[in-house]
Amino acid sequence: MMDDLTDVTVTSDGAEPGELFVTLEHLHSVPAWGSRPGYCHRGARALCAHYGLDWTEIVRAGGIPAGVLLATGDALALHLVEHARKEVTDGHGR
């Protein structure tokens, strides 16, 4: 289940205690539909603009709390959160 993050404990960089923090590393490594992994910055900026998120602040912070991405309901954002959750629970990410 994509929005069940209760088994993940991550506390850093603006996320609430116990909330997953989706990093730029996750953005760059998410399995995508092209020949290379990761989402491009152009697309990420467009997603942020569409949902009123501050791309500059996300870059400055190194990522964004998963709950913010989940709240968009956007399929690409949900896919990114699921990837980040898997990385963290498997010990490969923050």
Image (cartoon, grey):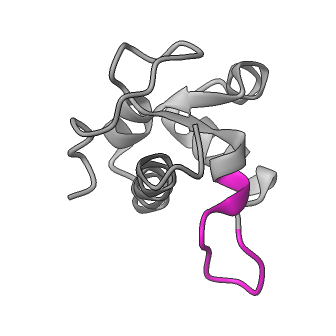
**Numbered circles on residues, count:** 0
Q: Position of residue 37 (x, y in %)?
A: 71, 72
Q: Position of residue 84 (x, y in %)?
A: 50, 50
Question: Residue at the spot x=62%, y=74% of the render?
Answer: 32
Question: Residue at the spot x=77%, y=78% of the render?
Answer: 36
Q: Position of residue 75 (x, y in %)?
A: 40, 61
Q: Position of residue 56 (x, y in %)?
A: 77, 24
Residue positioned most to the bottom: 35
Query: In the image, 7: left or right of 13?
Result: left
Quadrant including the C terminus: top right
User: Per the image, is 36 magenta?
Assistant: yes
The residue closer to the viewer here, 41 or 87, is 87
Question: Residue at the spot x=51%, y=54% of the render?
Answer: 87
Query: In the image, 58: left or right of 93?
Result: right
Magenta residues: mostly which secondary structure? loop
Question: Residue at the spot x=79%, y=50% of the render?
Answer: 41
What residue span does the magenta drawing correspond to? Answer: 27-37
Residue 54 position (above or below residue 41): above
The quarter of the displayed image where residue 54 is located: top right
Query: In the image, 47: left or right of 9?
Result: right
Quadrant including the N terminus: bottom left
The residue closer to the viewer here, 72 or 58, is 58
The quarter of the displayed image where residue 2 is located: bottom left
User: Per the image, is 23 magenta?
Assistant: no
